[in-house]
Structures are given as C-alpha cells and as structure tokens.
Amino acid sequence: MLINSEISILNIGIGNPVSVLNMLKNIGLSSRLISSAEEIRTAQRLIIPGVGHFGKAIDLLKKLNLIGGIKEHAHKDKPILGICLGMQLLCNGSEEGGAEGLGLIDADVVKFKNLNNDLKIPNMGWREVNIYDHKLKEGYEDIPRFYFTHSYYAICNKLENQFITADYGITYAAGIAK
Amino acid sequence: MLPRVIPILGIDGNKLVKTVKFRKPKYIGDPLNAIRIFNEKMVEEIAILDIRATVNRTEPNYQLIGEMAEECFSPLAYGGGIRTIKQVEKIFQLEIEKVVLNSMAFERPELITEISDSFGDQSVVVCIDIKQDIFGRNQLMKNSGSKKTSYSIEKAIDVFQEKGVGEIIIQDINRDGSFQGFNIDYIANIRELIKVPLVALGGCNGIQNMNSVLSKGANAIAAGSLFVYRNNNPNSILINYPKHNVIKNELN
C-alpha cells in the first residue's frame, strides 16, 4: 500500500526541499529529505523540488549518479511529483543550458519568445490557471492560483498529459500528469 | 493579469526597521513576527533588504534569513551584503527564491551572469537606487545610498540586462518613507528601456498611487512604509496588506 508510506523529497542543494517538507508537515504528512541513489531505491513516493537552472540541475543529477535511480523509480510505476524546475527535469530536454532531460514525460522546455511588450520575461507573479478533469483535480478550487517565476515553459507533445495550463502570450503546460 | 504587490522588509541586525530617505532607521519590530502577520494577511511575496550589511561590510545574516524563510509562506527575495556567488549559493540553500543586488551590480556586473547561469535569470534582481542631488540631477547610488556610482540610468539598465538580470527594482531614495507617491515621471521615462519586469519602489501612499505607476510602465509595485504603518502615519506601527479582493478589483 502506498497510501501511508513515507514521502521522500530529493535534496541535492538546489530548489526548496525544506519548504516542501514544512508544507507537508503543515497538512499532516510525514516526509524525509534524501540525496543518494540508494535512498531513491527505497523511496515510495518521490518529490523533486525546483528553482534553478535546467542544465546545471541535470549536471548535478549526473554527478550524484541519480538519473538511473529516478528513471527506475518511474519505470516501477512509483509516483514522482516534480515541482517547478523539478517538473521540467522530467521532460525530454530544455533550451536552458541545451540539456537533455530525464525523458519521462514527452514534453519540451523552451524559452518565452516574441511576446508583446506588456508581457515581460521572466513571467513573474500569481496567475490563475486552467485545470482539466483529472483524478489529480480533487481538492483544487475551480480557478486555482499559483506563483510563477520563469523564463522557460513546457510544451506537451501529448495533449492528454496536460492537466493544468497557463497563459502568458501562449498557452503552455503548467501541470502535467502521466 | 494581476500586478504584484511586494512589501519590502528592511532589516538591521536582527531588527525590522524603516527608514526615511534611507536615514533614521526606526525600530518596527521582530522580523519573524512581521512574517507571521504577513502570512495571515495572505501576502503574495516579500523582499527582505538588509540595509547595513554592505555599509558595515558584514556577511548576510544567514541565521535570520533562514528563520524568516522557514516562517514565510510566500516567495521571498533577499538583498544586502551580497558580494560573491558562494554567498548566493548559501542564501538559496536557505530557500530564498531570488537575490537582490545593488552595489555589486555596479562594481562587478559579471556576478549577475554567474547567478543567472547557475540558478536561472528569474533568480536575480537588481535594485537601482536613485537620488536627486541638489542640482536636481538623478544619481544612481550604491552602498545603501551613501556612494555615487558613475552609471547613467541608460547604461545601468543596458549593462544589467545584457548580463542577464531577471527583474529590476527602481527605488527613489528621496521618496523613501515620505508617502508622497511614486516617482511616476521617472518610471514613465525609462519604461521602454526595461525589457524585464519593472518594480517601482519609494513613496507609495495607496491603491490609487499604485494604479498610477502601473499605468505608466511599472509591472509590479513594492513599498516599505505603506505596509508597516497604519494609515500612512509613521507614528503608528501596524503591519498591513491589501486583501486579495482589493488587489483583484481595485488594481489594474
């Protein structure tokens, strides 16, 4: 049973793992911070937090030998939640640093381009998003708001994976489920 | 799309303070307590600025920054005393989302690129402090407003953007703590030069004034005194923040 099993948060010196841990504690869920391939192997539910530079983050995952472990986790059908850059890392690759991603989601991360003058890059601030019918929708308001701070966005190659979309000059995937 | 409304929390040692024209720091209270109140008021984001670290050549107050970050539910930016990428790494490990540069952006603009290349351009903000001298000329200042730089505003914006800055705060020192309103003409004059989000700071006195500066080119507004004093009265301390409905219905 996964329901009561512990949540593991990847902590590799980038992103905001402790914020995630604190927020989970706030809603009564226990979690732990992990940083090694061995710990990923024993993880049931894995969270990859974000904030950072795509190319640098992939380099770090390689250096710490974590890429195989994360892929294996996914291939065993154990859940992974990627937040912010953590979500982007699960995609095919990014224009940020021109690096290949984990390839677990068929989506590409590209830079905002040619927006009109009112839409500055990076996109920053709380934005309302569109949320689609999906099992993960439970618990969200009809029009949820999230804080965005990014110059790169994900485009899903399979539209059925798009679970939340946001608009900033173009419509892009802000939440992906597979 | 709603504009961002950002309280600026000035810190001096472990104290929350508020200045007037960058002088006379007045004790406001305990920074952690302020964060808790802003949490209750559903603040959308906060910037902490250490007003002494650069002048005193001290390290950022990592202990306090970490405690504030741990307490805070909203995205947090930190500025003050940052000189090296090592310090920035340490600050991001405390789970701060963005760093704000001032003096070092002028002294060594390459630091902007170093941060942007490691953490993404969205993580690096420059605060440009402007002060009118007695001849009415606008000078760009560093070291908490105590030293002139040789930069013109055009050159500063050009250099910082070329180095990869993600956001620019334009702060008017003469209006700090004055409640006399944003320097709207100045913002209007430079809006075309700034390609990244432009945050106006200095003098804000209320919603109407926010709307005025937003309509003249600011993408976000920031304020210090407005959010720590009651009814724009510097004798009456009260942490406050507009309700989401007010931001949604009255700001555009």
Image (tube, rainbow, N blue to C red):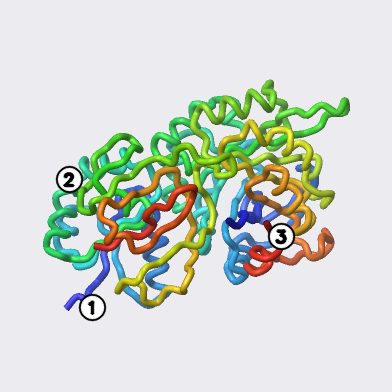
* Residue B152 as seen in the image, left or right of residue A81: right
Label of residue A57 in the image: none
Q: Amino acid at mark 3?
A: Phe
* Horizontal and vertical percent position of residue B163: 50, 28
Tell me the distance, in whole angstroms, between the alpha carbons under discs 2 and 3.
Answer: 47 Å
> Which one is nearer the viewer's eye here, B189 or B178?
B189
Quadrant location of the N terminus of chain A in the rendered image? bottom left
The residue that label 2 is drawn on is A65
Asked if marks 2 and 3 touch (Cβ < 8 Å), the reply is: no
Query: Disc 1 and disc 2: Cα gap in Å?
Result: 28 Å
In the figure, is residue A152 to the left or right of A74?
Answer: right
Relative depth, front residue between A29 and A122: A122
The amino acid pointed to by label 1 is: Ile
Residue drawn at (67%, 50%), measured in percent from left and top? B221
Quarter of image, res B144 = top right
At mark 2, the secondary structure is loop
Q: Residues within 10 Å of mark 1 (few under 14, many from 20)?
A: few
Residue lying at the far top of the rendered structure = B150
The answer to whether residue A56 of the structure is visible from this angle is: no
User: x%, y% of residue B52?
Assistant: 65, 42
Which residue corresponds to the image point at 68% horizontal and 66% vertical from the top-left? B249
Q: Quadrant of residue A10?
A: bottom left
Q: Which residue is mark 3?
A: B227
Q: Is residue B76 left or right of residue A160?
A: right
